[in-house]
Image: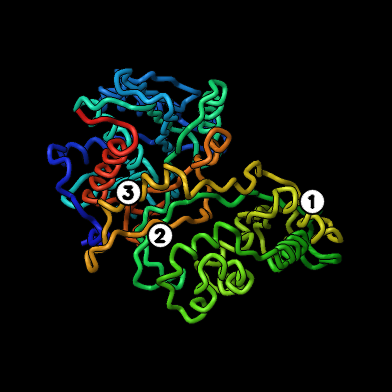
């Protein structure tokens, strides 16, 4: 039994949903090897073509009713409102996702219980790469729109479905989709993209026993910085002046150990305010007791508590993670020549990519090290609204489908900073409510192990609960039922 099932409520809604067929349709998406690459020439775009042909055949009401556009290899589906019920004051709602997945690590294929692209369905699980991140949400959004159209529901406002091609690497697909909408002067009411996939205990925020679901309102920035040290190499018996590996190691150490600014951002403060009434952790309880004003007054103290906590640390500081080193010698007695390392930064609000690059230059200025930005057009994102109609709609629908079985209370939705990158940021120029939230939930250990890892899977019950959520969201904010 999955632990997250205890939070499911009203699983009898929409009883005419064919549960087995829903699971099988989603599993069908997993059978396409839509792996994206930083070098787009390495991507098998024919797999995306086959995936989209499968989508057209599988959700016919959506694809026959919507305006269907291909932007590069990304999909833009626009469903227009019914003139009889349309409200011209309502801006479109955009439900989104990405069709690409990360590759299976070479050599681990045999570690999977079922082939990573089998889309295997058993009595409990749907297995395969993308079953959590995030073909389940793509399929669930299509299922919801298909259900609404098949049942004669009429749209009060435009509904846009946008599915990107390369969220896992370049995010060019979402940027292209957003550009199309910007050129048409579209202004979105709210966007729903992938979130944390979890119902979490708020113990990390000092409120153990309080179940919460995060709504990501902003993302940290992103930058990859490459360090290069060049050397003639030679015999290891005379390493006068240091080896390229030694110098590179020194440069990495300086950058990793350097203190970076620590701050409890406004969004962090909103997170603590959302759980303050339930905080019992003695480190935090006195600091949050005064609500938003008290939290603001104690922001520096709270930030220091977070800094020392493994789970909360990324919320208050720019993180520095060396991830790649190349060029080592293949023999123990030979000095390496040119060596390269990559350090990945997730940048806290208040710093820019340029700030990070300049800091790295300064930290190694006296060393023969070249510093270069590899990727980094993702500045810290804007902070979306927690007081808009989108957040309120998610909260209303979540209150029906996710409840604490022990208390009967609705699982609380809390605004959060997202430490990973999503396609949602691409729509910020045309939307002030880009919400990262997933109703397709898994247990924490499944998320940690399976997302980008081995044996990625989602329970059938969880997938179906997510579908119910998406149907209800349409009923709440987009459609008039027949």
**Badge number at residue 370:** 1
Q: In this rendering, does residue 338 appear at all?
A: no
Residue at the location (25% across, 51% down)?
Answer: 400
**Badge number at residue 396:** 3
Question: What is the x, y in percent for residue 159?
Answer: 38, 28
Please state if 3 lies on the left or on the right of 251 as rendered. Answer: left
Task: Say which residue label 2 marks.
Answer: 448
**Badge number at residue 96:** none
Cα–Cα span, label 1 and label 2: 35 Å
Q: Nearer the viewer, mark 1 or mark 2?
A: 2
Q: Nearer the viewer, mark 2 or mark 3?
A: 3
Q: Is residue 327 above or below residue 258?
A: above
Q: Which image quarter is the N terminus in?
A: bottom left
* Label 3 vs 1, first from the N-terminus: 1
Q: In this rendering, does residue 299 appear at all?
A: yes
Dot 3: what SS? helix
Q: Nearer the viewer, mark 3 or mark 1?
A: 3
Return the residue nearer the eye: 252 or 99.
99
Dot 1: what SS? strand
Residue at the location (73% across, 57% down)?
Answer: 336
Question: What is the x, y in percent for residue 435?
Answer: 46, 45
Q: Which image quarter is the C terminus in?
A: top left
């Amino acid at each position: 039994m999955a632990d997250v099932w205890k939070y499911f409520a009203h699983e009898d809604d929409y009883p005419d949903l064919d549960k087995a067929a829903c699971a099988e349709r989603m599993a069908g998406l997993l059978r396409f090897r839509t792996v994206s690459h930083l070098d787009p020439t390495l991507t098998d775009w024919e797999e995306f073509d086959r995936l989209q042909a499968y989508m057209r055949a599988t959700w016919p009401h959506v694809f026959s009713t919507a305006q269907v556009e291909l932007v590069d290899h990304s999909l833009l589906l626009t469903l227009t409102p019914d003139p009889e019920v349309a409200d011209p004051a309502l801006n479109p709602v955009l439900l989104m996702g990405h069709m690409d997945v990360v590759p299976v690590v070479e050599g681990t294929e045999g570690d999977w219980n079922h082939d990573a692209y089998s889309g295997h369905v058993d009595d409990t699980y749907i297995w395969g790469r993308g079953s959590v991140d995030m073909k389940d949400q793509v399929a669930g959004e299509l299922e919801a729109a298909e259900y609404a159209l098949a049942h004669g529901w009429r749209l009060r406002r435009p509904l846009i479905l946008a599915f990107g091609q390369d969220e896992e690497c370049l995010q060019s697909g979402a940027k292209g989709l957003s550009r199309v909408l910007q050129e048409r002067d579209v202004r979105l009411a709210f966007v729903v993209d992938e979130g944390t996939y979890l119902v979490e205990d708020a113990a990390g925020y000092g409120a153990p026993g309080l179940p919460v679901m995060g709504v990501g309102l902003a993302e940290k920035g992103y930058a990859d910085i490459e360090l290069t040290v060049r050397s003639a190499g030679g015999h290891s018996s005379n390493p006068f002046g240091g080896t390229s590996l030694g110098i590179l190691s020194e440069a990495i150490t300086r950058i990793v150990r350097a203190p970076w600014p620590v701050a409890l951002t406004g969004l962090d403060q909103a997170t603590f305010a959302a759980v303050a009434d339930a905080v019992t952790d003695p480190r935090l309880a006195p600091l949050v007791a005064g609500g938003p004003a008290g939290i603001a007054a104690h922001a520096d103290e709270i930030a220091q508590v977070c800094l020392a906590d493994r789970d909360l640390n990324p919320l208050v500081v720019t993180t520095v993670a060396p991830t790649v080193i190349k060029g080592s010698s293949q023999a123990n007695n030979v000095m390496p020549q040119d060596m390269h390392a990559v350090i990945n930064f997730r940048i806290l609000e208040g710093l820019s990519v340029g700030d990070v690059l300049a800091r790295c230059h300064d930290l190694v200025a006296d060393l023969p090290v070249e510093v270069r930005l590899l990727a980094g057009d993702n500045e810290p994102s804007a902070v979306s609204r927690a007081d808009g109609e989108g957040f309120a709609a998610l909260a209303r629908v979540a209150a029906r489908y996710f409840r604490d079985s022990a208390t009967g209370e609705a699982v609380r939705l809390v605004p959060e900073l997202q430490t990973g990158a999503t396609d949602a940021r691409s729509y910020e120029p045309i939307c002030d409510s880009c919400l990262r939230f997933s109703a397709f939930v898994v247990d924490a250990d499944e998320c940690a192990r399976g997302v980008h890892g081995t044996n990625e899977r989602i329970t059938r019950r969880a997938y179906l609960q997510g579908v119910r959520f998406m149907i209800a969201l349409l009923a709440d904010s987009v459609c008039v039922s027949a």
